[in-house]
Image: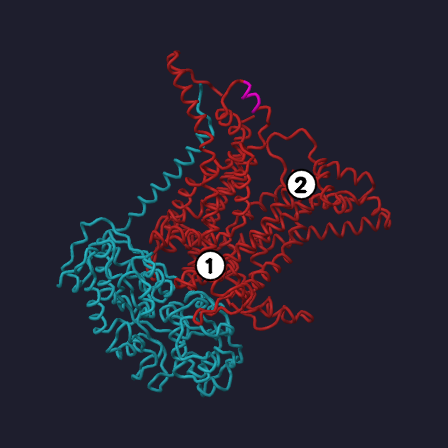
Amino acid sequence: MGKKGRPWVAAALAAGLALTVVGCSSAAKAGGSSSTTNPGSATAVGGANDLVTAAPVTLDGAGANSIDPFFERVFYDYHQANPKVSVHYSPAGSSAGIKDVQQATVDFGDSEIPMSSTDLAKAHGAILQIPVDLGGVALSYNLPAGPRGIKLDGPTLAGIFTGSITKWDDPAITALNPGATLPPTAIVPVHRADSSGPGWDLDAYLIKTAPAWVARIGTTKPSKTWPVASVGVGQQLNSGIATYIKQTPGAIGFVEFGYALRSGFVNAALKSGAGDFVAPSISSITAAGSVATTLSAKDFSIIDEPGAGAYPLANFSWTLVPQKPTDGAKGLALGKLLDYVVTTGQQVAPGLGYAPLPASVVTLAQQTIATLENPSGGALFRAA
Amino acid sequence: MTLASPPVPGLAPTLRRRAATRRAARLYPGVYWLGGVVFIGAVVALVVAVAQGSASAFAHAGLGFFWSTTWNPDAGDYAAGTLVVGTLVTTGAAMVLAVPVGLGVAVALSEVVPRRVAAALGPAVEFLAAVPSIVVGLWALLILSPVFASTVEPFLRGVPGLHWIFSGPAYGPSLLLAAVVLAVMTLPTIVALSRSALGAVPAADREAAMALGATRWQMIRTAVLPAARSGILAAVTLAVGRALGESIAVALVIGNRPVLPHSLISPGATLGTGIVNQFAEASPGVQTSAVIGLGAVLLVLTVAVNAAGQWILRRPAGVDTPPRGPVPSTDPGAETRAALVAHGWSASARPPVRASAVGTLARRRRSGRAAEWLCRTAVLVGLVPLGALLWFTVAKGAGAVSVSFITHGPTPPGVPGGGISTAITGTARIVGLALLLAIPTGLAASLLLYERRGRVAAAVRFAADVLTGVPSILIGVFAYTVLVRPLHHASTVAAAFALAVLMVPIMIRANEESLRTVASDLWEAGMALGASRPSVVRRVVLRQALPGVVTGNLLALSRGVGETAPPLFTVAAPASALTFLIFDQATQAYPEAQRTAWGAALVLLVLVLVSSGASRGVARYLTRKAR
């Protein structure tokens, strides 16, 4: 008998092609330029096994969208210095990070708001919560002819986000901004369509400062889900809000300061706990972070704290890690990576719109990282 | 065909071959049964996963889940009412826009414009049908939305008498913009399917009308359109099914406001966007269950609509697509007419004579000409958005694409020189693996349909019908539920599995159709020569059907490459798949991110063009070779 049937040949060709593609791309993935720079101090984890000789490790993370620009940069830098360690981070949102850690579909999560005891109870095993960045939430607006740094306070913002203040030249706004000429443009408030850390922060600020807001939402407990979704436009993630503000004259919305900085937005100055109007900046966010002397995952909020020049909408972002990772090699790599993030990695923070962590918080982070355990039990890192 | 002779003419090789043939004969039914069972198993698993996943939400909210309108996770209130309304409103508005234009274009291409123009536009329309929805979404978000906010919506708001549907602030993202996106997305489908329905109307019907003194337009109206009615209806139903389930592109432009809409220019939300926005962050328990519950409602809606479409399409055999391969000797028109009449459609029941009795010839010609100009206008109206979509993708994308863009991985903000290489290889890996899973399953299951007529075959066919109607977002949710969550790992394998589930039904239908076109005398001849059943299938039937099989599989591939939802739910990060990357970068406010999105969209478009072009080329080549 002659040739095999050609259909099979075609099928085999297709299969072969597919296999080649699979093969090639896994080879391509291992790329990455080598670098001679060594990531700096690894104080807490100095005694750990050396990773240079270890097999390549890929760490998957998911969570807060606000920290994404910082994480992307730090993970990139770390990979340049340690080509064997690749990190994938999916910035799907804080709640997604918590959920993924609970279901153990990622190696680490990240949330702007630490996990509550209810959240922790739903996870398998203990979860460590490590503060890794200090950011702020900007109220960015798009008023081509309007002044920069418009001053706003809680009641005015509550009016904007509940729809009772609809024009930029509303008396409530002009009263706060004597001397400024505000255009009669319609205000388009933009809020998050998904649940979010920045939404929680602004909700907490409004609950603290605007009785009308509390009356409208009927609770004094801040929520990650934006409580007044029926006013204005909902957008996914910080990026969705930023894109919308950029496209829409008259729009105002809350975005992580890093996103606002990179988008070149003008931001409102908010009435702070100390009574003055403060615009978001590295220094005002640093000032807000310096009040966090008793920071912990249970006592995490630094919203509207009194402090000279402190921006009222600042917050820490928390990385969530199972205390006992199921894969020892990954656990080691993750511990070293996180130590880098809270130490050397902080150097790139100001350029991206985040304040460097205060020294006390770095210590807290390193102490927490040091409690990581082996899959078999016992400390993953020897004391340095 | 050349026959390679065995090196040593002897008995042993012959016996070995015979034994091998016998083994193959025994294995053959096993192979196709396995394919069928695997496929049915996957569909059952999907339905069970959705039902099981949503059970606790239905238990929690009761029947009110379907119509109640509060969605407040903090208070534990979950209901689909507003989202069902948003879904129906956007789909309805999209069809109001797309159906008249689509029908006009189809009639124009099939009956009115010169053949050469039609021949040029026809393939273009078919290519547009393959444009990934994420590309349409990108274009609508970055180009259309600002125009809607500044011009279109304020204008509509000012139109007297329309205040009841156009009122409130002009934000840009709105139900209307979502409807426009859906209309642009479904228009090519409506045109392509309606056109093939029109093309299948037998010449005899047209000639009869013309012989009775009808003008060209009267011929179209009284003979062609009624005869193609079921095909057109099926095209519209399929478009409705697709519009109901489209989620990712809609989520980019609808404004995501889960409250009952009071105006078409207000933001809204649909079942699909509800899943996109909520699934990733829904905490385990009732909230996750409620999101899957949205999926269950969507599943019921789309499957019902799609099943109706399939049913209409199947009812009169031969109307839907022009026959491929060897043409049956009987006149398909006669069958069609008989079937149409039997089902109560008055195919040519209204004699053109009656129409011709009304008015003078001049008046009939005038009104006919007016109608034909309307159709030509529809071509222009339809071409404008589709042309703009392509133009912007190419123009904006070309500025971003370079060699280093394709060969470099992504860089973080502020570090120049980033590219999309990881997304390209990621998509290649996902699609390659998906083809490895889907091609054998699809082929085996279609052989089952070819060989058997029993209940299992009916079940496979039914399952394929159901699955073609299932929105890809649900398949993403399904893959997450059965692979990512239990295995605690986002992976290429899970994404490939999702894509395979999406592609197999397309393959099964295409394969079966091609197998059926193989003339039965070839089959009988093979059997008469004493060949075993599997070897006839392999050497005669499959070889004859190969062009169709390859075409169908490549079409499935081009669909798979452009899907966004499966990777969205299954891979670790946006940079691992082209479509996911576009979705991620499109929503960034930074020019360089948007450039990346356009560049990736252009690369994706080229990939789809290549695979759909390849499917035509390969089909033509193989058909020529088979002769």
Which chain is red in the rendering? B
Q: Which mark is residue B335?
A: none
Which chain is cyan in the rendering? A
Residue on which disc 1 sits = B55
Pinpoint residue B1: horizontal percent, then vertical percent.
Answer: 49, 21
Residue on which disc 2 sits = B316
Pinpoint residue A40: horizontal percent, then vertical percent.
Answer: 18, 62
Report the magenta residues as a range.
B523-528
Label 1: state its secondary structure.
helix
Three-letter amino acid code of the residue under disc 1: Ala
Label 2: state its secondary structure.
loop
Q: Earlier in the sequence, mark 2 or mark 1?
A: 1
Tell me the crowding category of disc 1: few under 14, some 14 to 19, or many 20 or more residues within 10 angstroms, Cα based: some
Labels 2 and 1 in the same subunit: yes
- Viewer-nearest of discs 2 and 1: 1
Is residue B610 at all visible to an observer of this figure?
no
Task: Name the image quarter holding the C terminus of chain B.
Answer: top right
Residue A36 position by quadrant: bottom left
